């Protein structure tokens, strides 16, 4: 029997707004309106200022290690708007602060998280979101589980989960992809390909020409988009969401972008990145190209930019004040918010701040009873 081709595939690349702020009208249909683009530009600008101030808070010792989102705002903005707030679930990593905010997470709580205050992870009532996930890749399993639960319950909506290119080299990524694919769960896997897994470049962490092609192994609709283009990101996410809520199962989106800052404030990317590479990507900045587009449409000018700058300063100032002005946590909170109904032993520990039960039963911590021979 002669050989025959049993499987063929292709990966599409979508760009609607190029680096010069020129819109491809033929692809723009079904994407953002000018009003939405204007709103997202303002949100991205305010968030960029938030990001800069968060960096300064860390450098001044007022906050712990912080991962900047600078340069990647369009991925979070476009996809966040495409998902339906209060209906869809957002399962974030740690560079999607803008998407989290668009779905109801207050910015000051995000700062509290990085300040080491666990109350920053208390998701507000009615907000369908999981806390920030710092471990690489583990949260994608949660997204697959949430999607399956929604399907079993007959709930409308979808789940979107974010991760970097490096996370697709983790076993949890493949487990989540397979689980969602087999069960046809309404999950959107959104990879922010920012070219670097900390200090390891894309081409050294995988042999795949794209991240998007990994979804082919799970027979999952997949696409690569210009992740610095809010129009392309929005359209791709909107289409994936429509497919998910209509029973079409999971989808994969690879948003091509670049982190213009270090991996975190504990990193120095100058040790491993070529300055020319950073400069080239800086010219593709999503804020710059979006502003060029809005200006070409007569929707933006220097006066409006100045007013936005002033508004951003005021908003971010209030965010910092709220985060730093919160009442310090009580030691008792560990017990009161960890357990729905604490046992008598836990109540005693909380009230006395002593692990009294250990003295009664040394076996709890592996100690031999007094007098027992070795």
Image: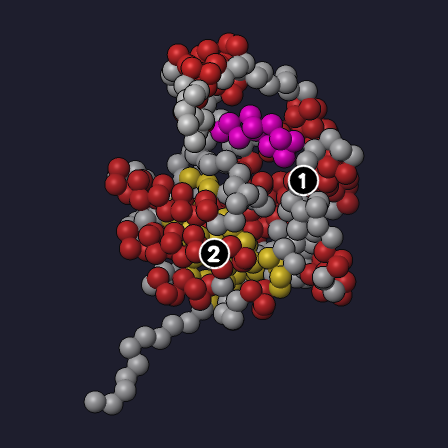
Q: Residue at x 47, y 56 (%)?
A: 170
> Between 209 and 13, which is closer to the camera in this rendering?
209
- Which labelled disc corresponds to residue 299? none
Q: Residue at x 44, y 20 (%)?
A: 370
Segment tinted magenta in the rendering: 113-123
Q: CA distance from mark 1 to mark 2?
A: 23 Å
Instruction: Please identify the quarter of the rendering in which residue 56 is found.
Output: top right
> Between 149 and 88, which is closer to the camera in this rendering?
149
> Between 340 and 295, which is closer to the camera in this rendering?
340
The residue tagged with tag 2: helix, strand or loop?
loop
Q: Earlier in the sequence, mark 1 or mark 2?
A: 1
Q: Is residue 151 left or right of residue 356?
A: left
The residue tagged with tag 1: helix, strand or loop?
loop
Q: Is residue 178 left or right of residue 262?
A: left
Q: Is residue 293 magenta?
A: no
| Residue 200 in picture, x, y percent from top left | 62, 61
Residue 310, placed above or below residue 139: above
Residue 215, placed above or below residue 338: below
What is the tally of numbered marks visible in this picture?
A: 2
Query: Could one spot residue 207 in this view of the protein?
Result: yes
**Residue carrying label 2:** 170
Quadrant containing the C terminus in the rendered view: top left
> Between 306 and 365, which is closer to the camera in this rendering?
365
Query: Could one spot residue 313 in this view of the protein?
Result: no
Q: Residue at x 40, y 43 (%)?
A: 142
| Residue 105 in picture, x, y percent from top left | 54, 32
Structural crowding at the residue carrying mark 1, measured as other residues with C-alpha within 10 Å and reported as few (<14), some (14–19) or many (≥20): some
The image's colouring method is secondary structure
Q: Residue at x 41, y 39 (%)?
A: 88
| Residue 85 in picture, x, y percent from top left | 45, 36
Residue situated furthest left in the rendering: 1
Q: Is residue 116 magenta?
A: yes
């Amino acid at each position: 029997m002669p050989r025959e081709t049993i499987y063929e595939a292709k990966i599409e690349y979508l760009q609607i707004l190029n680096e010069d702020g020129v819109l491809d009208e033929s692809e723009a249909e079904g994407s953002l309106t000018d009003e939405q683009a204007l709103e997202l530009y303002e949100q991205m600008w305010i968030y960029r200022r938030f990001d800069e101030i968060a960096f300064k808070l860390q450098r001044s010792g007022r906050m712990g290690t912080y991962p900047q989102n600078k340069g990647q705002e369009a991925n979070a903005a476009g996809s966040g708007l495409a998902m339906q707030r209060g209906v869809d679930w957002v399962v974030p990593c740690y560079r999607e602060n803008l998407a989290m905010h668009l779905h109801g997470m207050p910015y000051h709580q995000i700062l509290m998280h990085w300040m080491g205050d666990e109350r920053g992870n208390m998701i507000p009532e009615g907000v369908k979101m999981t806390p920030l996930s710092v471990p690489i890749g583990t949260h994608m399993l949660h997204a697959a589980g949430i999607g399956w639960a929604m399907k079993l319950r007959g709930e409308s909506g979808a789940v979107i989960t974010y991760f970097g290119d490096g996370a697709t080299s983790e076993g949890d990524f493949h487990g989540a992809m397979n689980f969602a694919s087999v069960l046809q769960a309404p999950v959107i896997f959104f990879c922010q390909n920012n070219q670097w897994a900390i200090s390891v470049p894309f081409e050294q962490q995988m042999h795949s020409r794209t991240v998007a092609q990994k979804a082919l192994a799970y027979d999952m609709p997949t696409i690569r988009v210009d992740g610095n283009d809010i129009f392309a990101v929005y359209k791709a996410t909107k289409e994936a969401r429509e497919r998910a809520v209509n029973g079409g199962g999971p989808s994969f989106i690879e948003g091509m972008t670049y982190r213009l800052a270090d991996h975190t404030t504990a990193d120095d990317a100058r040790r491993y990145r070529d300055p020319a590479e950073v400069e080239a990507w800086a010219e593709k900045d999503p804020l710059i190209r979006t502003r060029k587009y809005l200006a070409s449409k007569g929707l933006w000018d220097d006066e409006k930019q100045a007013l936005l700058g002033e508004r951003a300063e005021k908003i971010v100032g209030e965010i910092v004040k709220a985060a730093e002005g919160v009442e310090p946590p009580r030691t008792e909170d560990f017990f009161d918010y960890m357990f729905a109904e604490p046992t008598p032993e836990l109540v005693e520990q909380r009230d006395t701040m002593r692990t009294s039960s250990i003295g009664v039963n040394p076996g709890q911590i592996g100690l031999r009873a007094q007098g027992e021979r070795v």
